[in-house]
Amino acid sequence: MKRFLALTTALLLVACASAPPPPEWQSQSFAALKSYTAAYLRGNTRVAEVEFERAKAEIARTGRPDLMARIELLRCATQVASLVMDPCVAYHALAQDAAFAEQAYASFIAGRWDTLQAPHLPLHYRALVTQTQASMRQTAKPEQGANTQIPSKLLRIEDPLARLVAAGALIQREPLSNADIDLAVETASAQGWRRPLLAWLGVQLKRNQSLGNTGAAAAIQRRIDLAL
């Protein structure tokens, strides 16, 4: 669970058995965020919205805008994993009270990596950002389709949701390789996450259509029809 909700771990870890139980708002907000994330990734928007509002209500009891900023970032990151790139408006309204780590994470999920300091990010994203920044300094930004044969940049990120968040952040910066598009599709598929699966299958479909791979495109369309 720590890996599943990495952004909120420091806030919401349940105390060990020998310690006093955590405050009610903490355990309730943790449970609501877990339910929100699961429902959103399954594609159940109604349940996701209800659970996120429940989490917000619990956090509001603390009167701490920095914690509210953190969970708004969690919501935006979950959306980025599904290629929903809407501005993170609710977070930006709280950004002045957000911790530096949250500000760095906001830049990461928005694809603003040029001046991003990788050590301020969760550990599983640091190598990707460092590698991408080094490539930017060495070469010009690749054209669409130019890097389709490059090996996966995302394979070293083991956590499924973290990998999809990274894929959604990276695609805002550069065209993904075929390997990374395929990896995003299969990551969502293996977890049974309908919403990001459909989003990444759409990317995979367009890539194969643009390359004239009609057989592969037809197979992808069958997967989309089944998921729908």
Image (cartoon, helix red, strand yellow):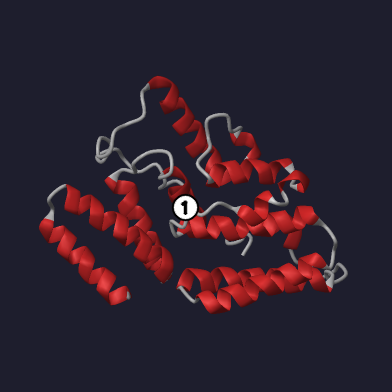
Quarter of the image that includes the C terminus: bottom left
Camera-side residue of 167 and 84: 84
Q: Is residue 126 above or below residue 25?
A: above
- The x and y percentages for residue 166 are 48, 48
Camera-side residue of 169 and 159: 169
Which residue appears farthest toward the right when viewing the image?
A: 20
Q: Residue at x 45, y 33 (%)?
A: 132
- The x and y percentages for residue 159 are 50, 56
- The x and y percentages for residue 24 are 82, 74
Q: Is residue 136 above or below residue 106?
A: above
- The x and y percentages for residue 114 are 52, 30
Q: Residue at x 66, y 53 (%)?
A: 91
Horizontal arrangement in the rendering, residue 219 relative to residue 228 (left or right)? left
Camera-side residue of 21 and 194: 194
Determine whether the residue tagged by mark 1 lies in a helix, strand or loop.
helix
Quarter of the image that includes the N terminus: bottom right
Q: How many marks?
A: 1
Quadrant in the picture for residue 204: bottom left
Horizontal arrangement in the rendering, residue 221 relative to residue 127 (left or right)? left
Quadrant in the picture for residue 38: bottom right
- Is residue 210 in sight in this rendering? yes
Residue type at mark 1 is Arg
Q: Residue at x 26, y 41 (%)?
A: 148
Horizontal arrangement in the rendering, residue 107 relative to residue 65 (left or right)? left
- Is residue 3 in sight in this rendering? no
Which residue appears farthest toward the top when viewing the image?
A: 138
Q: Which residue is mark 1?
A: 163
Q: Residue at x 24, y 54 (%)?
A: 206
Dot 1 alpha-carbon crowd within 10 angstroms: few under 14, some 14 to 19, many 20 or more: many
